[in-house]
Image: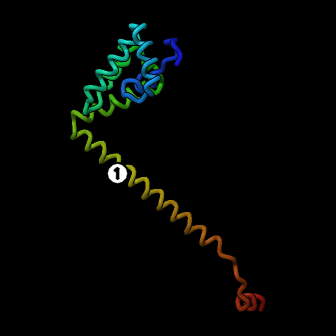
Amino acid sequence: MDKNIENITEDLMMRYVEGDLSSDEAQKFKKILSHNEYLSNRVSILKSIVDKKPMKSPSTRVHGKILSDIGLADDSSISIIRRFIDSFMSSFESRPGLAGSFLSVFVIAVISSIVIYNSVNLENNNQRNITDDPIEKDEDLDDSLTT
């Protein structure tokens, strides 16, 4: 195990907190913790979170605060999308009537799209059946036209 704090990953810290390291690795990690106050604080925060075993996931605001407290700000573009979706969905949490209305409109739109697609597809298939039939020569008709 490398003693350089830059090489210590969150995964390694979580493995230590959850007791998934071998005894040799755990001893080396404890030694590193005793020499680095910053890392020791981060591990103690993780231990307190794991020990409390929250029954519910924290809100995105609390989750962001936890990440910023341990020095891991989430600035990815995915987090921007996630924040937009979370704020959109949170508007439905406080207004179940609005959620029901939105869901009803969504279901009606999907069903309408399926019905329209199927009717257009059926119409196209009917046109193909008419035009795809080979033209058969009617000998009686041909004889009556020539006489």
What SS does tag 1 mark? Answer: helix
Total of numbered circles in the picture?
1
99 in relation to 65, above or below: below
Q: Give 95 or 39, whichever is nearer the viewer.
A: 39
Location of residue 41 in the rendering, given as x and y in whole percent from the top left corner = 35, 12
Horizontal side of 102 relative to 111 (left or right) equals: left
91 in relation to 115, above or below: above
Q: Residue at x 42, y 7 (%)?
A: 35
Q: Give 143 or 134, whichever is nearer the viewer.
A: 134
Q: Give 88 or 106, whichever is nearer the viewer.
A: 88
Location of residue 71 in the rendering, given as x and y in whole percent from the top left corner = 41, 13
Q: Residue at x 71, y 92 (%)?
A: 140
98 in relation to 107, above or below: above
Residue denoted by label 1? 108
Residue type at mark 1? Ile
Q: Quadrant of residue 27?
A: top left
